[in-house]
Amino acid sequence: MNMIQETLGEHSSPDVPLNVDGTAFPLDIASIKDRTSLITLDDLPSLDYAIYLTNTVKFHISQTYHLCEETSFTRILNMIYDQETRPDPRNRLKYIQYFVVMAFGKALLGRVGSNAQPPGSEYFMRAMEMFPDITGLYGDPILAVEICCGLALYLQSIDHRNSAYLYLGLGLRVSLSQGLHRDLSGGYRDAVEETRHRSAWWTLYILDRKFSSLMGAPSSINDGDISVPLPEGPLSMQKSKVIDMHVKLSRLIAKVINTVYAADDKLDSSFLRNTQTILRELAAIGDELAMSPELKPGNSSPVSRVSATLNLCYHQCILLATRPLLICLLRDRLQDRTADIGSNRQTVEPITALLKTSSDSASQSLRILEALKSHDLVECFLPFDLEQIFSSGFIITLLSAIHPFPNAVDESGFEKALGLLDTLIANGNVSARFRREELARLHEMLLLVGQQDGSPDGGEGAGLEDLDVRTQGMSPNQILSIAELLDSYPDLDAMMEQGNESWL
């Protein structure tokens, strides 16, 4: 938006909203730290309500992320509500996990919180108050990882991204220092402990990949250094498939960030080849999703939340891979305008195909989210649906402004994104209000650019009629054909090596 504001001029452009980290819900965590005080377990929810909150977490989170082991957490509940048991400092980590789960349970119920504090914050703050020094995390490293993942996910949900990233990094360092990224086969007490270790590690891995992509930061560990297998044991076959697919998609997100994005604001010379590789891997994953009926979107009624989560993650990979291309197109259009150069650029066929892929994924994401909304399954507290709505609306807004192919303007898609954000806002999501403000302002600023320039002519997109898939969505074979289409334009590599972006 700063780039657009510079083009419009200070007096013609509206202000850019500056919603800095933690603005949604300010938390004064530092002032509550007092490790010298005794641990108290006063003002707890009743046991039946605590069980209800726990089951809420199981439904909303435990199907795709591991924050606690069910049997172990049941023992924690029984210990805490045993009136004959006094609080023991040696159980500090267990108490923290209890308060984290209670905080999530209350937040996920969808009750609108006050503007001052997010729902469940009274329990979250007690967990933070008890959080130990670094050495206190090594008494039970798997429990410590579960706690760090829980704290990070809650913080991310209330728009404290920097703190979330740091707590996740703390969990990762504990894991690495204790060898939890290694295969420990034969070193477990039983199958339950083995599954717990593997589930905790891979949840940490998935969140690290997702949060790193949101921060624009590199991933914290290389895949080649990880030897711990995916969880098996007591898990159902479907849950094992879900974890396997979630890990593959998260790994691909990291690959997009590490290979497609450049350190400066220009496309790297290897951008097209890296994007081609990503598309081929996405096509393979798309085939896997299509071959698993329980993971295929729209396959069953009512809508499967787990299937929707994985398919949204799949489309997020596409949006991330193509977003640098859109940003560069917008930058070049604005630079041409500033230099008073007529915009007669003709986007070559494979680039137009990439942009159509991006457009399709944004539209497909919004359709999935609309289906979730109709079944009251949109997550109004967890951050991932919000991020997907904003990413899809962002892509649609840029495409409508750049107009690289016929029918690129999608005002209905933009309105659909705003409508979904309004749903989150109505359910108390303050972060959604900020994202809506940012998306609406971006749309307004790009409209001002268009009004000053006149309506865009748009690209021709010749030969791409078979890729017009707004209704049905783009199949893995079509994605693969786009990857192969890049091979038919060998001159693109030379242009990129020379820094020539005329193909845009």
Image: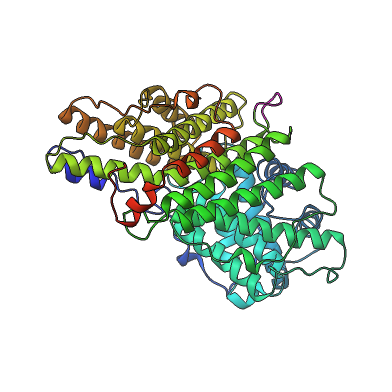
Q: Position of residue 500 (x, y in %)?
A: 28, 51
Is residue 459 highlighted in magenta? Answer: no
Residue 131 seen: no
Figure check: 21 above or below 314:
below
Magenta: predominant secondary structure element? loop
Pick whichever, 482 or 282, lies toward us.
Answer: 482
Image coordinates for residue 99, horizontal then vertical, percent: 64, 56
User: In the image shown, does 442 or 104 lie closer to the viewer?
Assistant: 442
Residue 442 percent location from the top left of the image: 30, 37
Q: Where is residue 278 in the image (x, y as percent from the top left)?
A: 53, 48
Is the N terminus in the top left, top right, bottom left or bottom right quadrant? top left
Which image quadrant for residue 182?
bottom right
Give the residue at x 79% y 53%: 74
- In the rendered image, the residue lying farthest to the right is 190
Going by the image, does 461 lie left or right of 193?
left
185 lies above or below 325: below
**Bounds of the magenta segment:** 298-303
